[in-house]
Amino acid sequence: MKVQFATYDLISEDNNIYSSAKIPDDYHQTWHYVYFSYSHSSKSAVGGIRYGDANWEVETFNNIYHNDKGDINSLKFYLGSSDSSKFQSINGYFYNAALYTN
């Protein structure tokens, strides 16, 4: 099984640029760490995933051009639950959680 990191490029008008990272067979009941970002200054996007204590699987997209205005239209951040909150992901509580932006 694989997970896909996807992005787009305004210059080439390609809205389906993606790369796949392998999911290990024993991924159940382990912490999953997912990271995806875009750098305006380096014109690159980076996606990474880590399962438990395993090494990071990192995918880099170079020469990617997004909106140069730097406007963020939306942001989704999920902490300890699934996208639609159908399943409780963590049996417990978070205290003093914070999200910082510049």
Image (cartoon, rainbow, N blue to C red):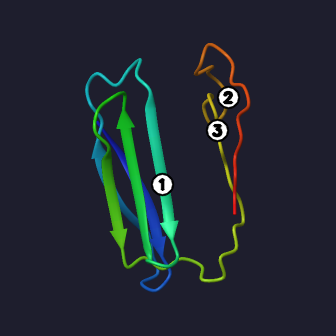
Q: Position of residue 88 (x, y in %)?
A: 63, 19
The answer to whether 7 appears left or right of 75 in the picture is: left
Query: In front: mark 1 or mark 2?
Result: 1
Q: Nearer the viewer, residue 73 or 45?
A: 45
Q: Which residue is mark 1?
A: 36
Residue type, label 2 = Ser
Q: Give the vertical position of 78 relative to 4 (above or below).
A: above
At 59% from the left and 19% from the top, the residue drawn is: 90
Q: Which residue is mark 3?
A: 78
Q: Which residue is mark 2?
A: 85
Q: Position of residue 85 (x, y in %)?
A: 67, 28
Q: Nearer the viewer, residue 78 or 9?
A: 78
Q: Are marks 1 and 3 in contact (CB under 8 Å)?
A: no
Distance between mark 1 and mark 3 Cα atoms: 14 Å
Q: Write down the quadrant of residue 18 in the picture.
A: bottom left
- First reached walking from the N terminus: tag 3 or tag 2: 3
Residue type, label 1 = Phe
* Residue neighbourhood size for the residue with mark 2, other residues' Cα within 10 Å, grouped as few (<14), some (14–19), many (≥20): few
